[in-house]
Each structure stands twice: as C-alpha cells, then as structure tokens.
Image (cartoon, grey):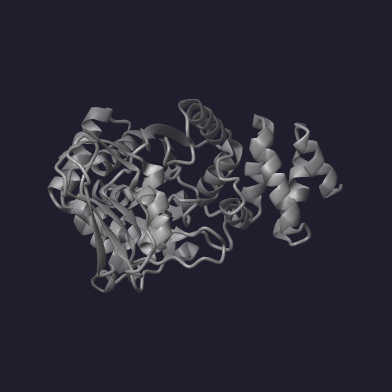
Amino acid sequence: MNILDIITRKKNGANLSYDELEYAFMGYLNKDIPTYQMSALLMAITINGMNMSETLALTDIFIKSGEQYNISADVKNTVDKHSTGGVGDTTTLIVGPMIAAMGMHMVKMSGKGLGLTGGTIDKLESIPGMNVKLTKQELIDKANEVGFALSSQTKELTPLDKVIYSLRDVTGTTESIPLIASSIMSKKIALGAENILIDIKVGDGALIKTQNEADELSKLLVAIGESYNRNVRTIISNMDTPLSYAIGNAIEVKEAINVLHGKKCPLYDVAVECAANLLSMARGLDIEECRMYAEKTIETGKALQKFYEFIQAQGGRLADMKISDKIIPINANKTGRIKKIDALGAAKLAAKLGASKMTIDDKIDYSVGVYLNVLEGDKVNEGDLLMKLYVNDPNIELSKGDFSFIDIAE
C-alpha cells in the first residue's frame, strides 16, 4: 500500500478499508508515516467524513494499538463518563465524587485540552503533587479505595489515539464526528467500564456546533458501544454559554469545589444529570429517583468528602494550588441586561491569558483565567463588575474586542 494513494482516495471521497486505515494510522504510530502526511489524511477525513464501517474499523485499530485493561473484572459496579468538551466544564471533578458517594466506582481516563476547550488533566495538573499518570494496578487500587480514580492516557492504553489526539489539536481537525467517536469509544472500551455515559456538548463553545452533528455523534457512540456489548447512553447539553463562572484551570478546580459545597449554577445542574443517569444505568432505577439521590450526595457533604479523598489518594496538595494574585477587573460600560455570554469568546480570552495551548509546544499557565461575575439574564448597572481576569502579565495587551463576548442589551 501507498500512503499517498490512501490520502488521495479519501480526499476524493472514497471509503477506506480496514487494511488501508491500519496501514496509515499504525504507520504513523510507528513513525513510518510522517506528520505532514497524517495531517493531510486527517484533514481529508474531516472534510469528507467516514461511514460506519470505517468508524468501527478505526475504533478497533485504536483499541488494538495497545493493551486492554478490562477494569470491570477487578472493580465492581463500574461506570464511566465523558464530555465532548466545553468551556468552564469541570463536570468530571464533581460527578466522580458523587458516584463514589453513591456506592459505585468510576475509573476514568481523561485527556488534555483539545483546541480551546479545557481538558480535565490540565485542570488537575494545576494541583501540585497530583499524580495523573497511574498504572493499571494503581487505577484499580485507588478506585476500590475511594470509589473514583482518574488518570491521563497511559503509554499502554490506546497509544495510537494519544498521538492522533495531539495532532488533531493543532491541525484544525478537532471537529470530525467519526474521529471524535473513535477517540472517545476506543479509550472507554479499552479501559473496560460496563456503563458509559457521554455528555455531548453542543454550541459555539463546543467541538460539536449543531444539533444534527450531536445526533450523528450520538448514533455513532451507541452503535460502537453495542458492537462491544457495552451499555452506552448519551445526553446532549448546551454550550453556547460557559458552563460555569470560571474559565481556566486552577480557578475551575476551585469552582468545582464550590459546586460540591452546594453552589447552584449550570455546572451543578449538568453534574446532577450525569450522576443521575449513571446511577440509573448501573442500577436500573427511575431517573427522577436517581436525581434525588445525586443531589443528596452534595446536600450531605458526602460528595465533597469523596473529592478530598480522591485528591489525597492521588497525591494532590490543594493548599498549594496557585491562582494568580494579579487581577484586572472588567466593568460594564452601560446599564442593561446580560443578553449573551458567548462561550467561544470567553475561551479565546482565557487562551490569550495563557490558560490553554494553541500549539503542541505551548506551555499552559495553570494560575490564569477568567472569572465571570454575571450570568445570562442578569441586570447590571454601568460600572458593575462583569468579570475578573487573573493574569501573570499585568501589561498584557487587551482590546474591547476581547470582551465583546458579553452582550449587554439596554
């Protein structure tokens, strides 16, 4: 086979065979295919898509590129949850402790940020000492001990997805529905959870922009799950506006703690919905009853306690987590009502401050970010505080355009 022929065939809209996909993708993993050619193939896939057969084949190739853990053989009542990426989304850090507090076990493998959307691993790495590189045995032990264990992708599990994920992040190919589906499900299946919930974020601040794309992804995820005998459910949530007040890394961890203390906001609502669905899937209970149980874990403080146990078990020192003390306040320039807070614009501002990566070689500043003081629908007077910018460069060049993501209607 010839990689140039494979790129050309996909560029022209042809369907690729299992062997062709394996030749190209495993060739890249083994460094036989150069980055520029894999980038071209990813772009051709992003433009022309893949059918179900191709998507199932690529998922299988991802899975077989490394080990398969089958965690459910060693950890009982296993559930897993994934979000397709959003702005201000620390749902995992809330749902995991809620699940543990309800007597189940979440063993999760998370990724770094993809594009402008924050990654759970980036947020956890803002906590000094936090070990997010767990071995299979460490995952099993900590999940059985606490009820919730989380790791970054290991070298052993789906190594092909890891290198493709990083390349997609910087080549404008993050939004491909089949590539998203294969990436998500290969990790979930290789890890081995019995019940898998996928929270599909839709809107300006998400990888998935439209309801039609969300429906397409949902069908793919469920179909892949069925082919591997996994119980997969999807929920679709809005990401036109940030999910929480905080956009960054350390400040998002702090906000997750606020929600575990009982702070009500969209992040709270989504976390309860995810936890309730996972309980319903695992135990076969009515969803309304499960929502009640999920909320109870926060009301009683049991989920918060599990969060602290999780951080301690993985070596994190929350007391040493740094949020920049250089703050730039941004105030309203007129009186009115907050008509719109655009998630993508908020993410771009946080990225400008250094909260996410734009190239593979960029360094993330975990201490910076944007903290909103308002939500959509709030009334503000001229001079009221709209947001705080946590920066490390007080002389950073900012313009009015950087704040246009907040629309105030008079």
Expressed as whole percent of the image width and height from the top left, the position of residue 397 reads 39, 62
Kindly identify the residue that appears in the image at 55 percent across and 39 percent down: 181
With respect to residue 7, does 326 lie above or below? below
Q: Is residue 181 visible?
A: yes
Which quadrant would the C terminus be assigned to in this image?
top left
Q: Quadrant of residue 395?
A: bottom left
With respect to residue 291, does 312 lie above or below? below
Kindly identify the residue that appears in the image at 74 percent across and 62 percent down: 31
Expressed as whole percent of the image width and height from the top left, the position of residue 315 reads 33, 71
Q: Quadrant of residue 376?
A: top left
Q: Nearer the viewer, residue 105 or 374?
A: 374
Kindly identify the residue that appears in the image at 74 percent across and 44 percent down: 21
Expressed as whole percent of the image width and height from the top left, the position of residue 290 reads 24, 34
Total marks placed: 0
Q: Is residue 337 left or right of residue 121?
A: left
Q: Of all residues shown, which one is farthest toward the right?
A: 1
Q: Is residue 154 left or right of residue 402?
A: right
Expressed as whole percent of the image width and height from the top left, the position of residue 391 reads 32, 65
Q: Is residue 355 visible?
A: no
Q: Is residue 36 left or right of residue 306?
A: right
Q: Is residue 244 left or right of residue 199?
A: left
With respect to residue 22, does 52 lie above or below? above
Q: Nearer the viewer, residue 45 or 350?
A: 350
Kindly identify the residue that appears in the image at 67 percent across and 43 percent down: 43
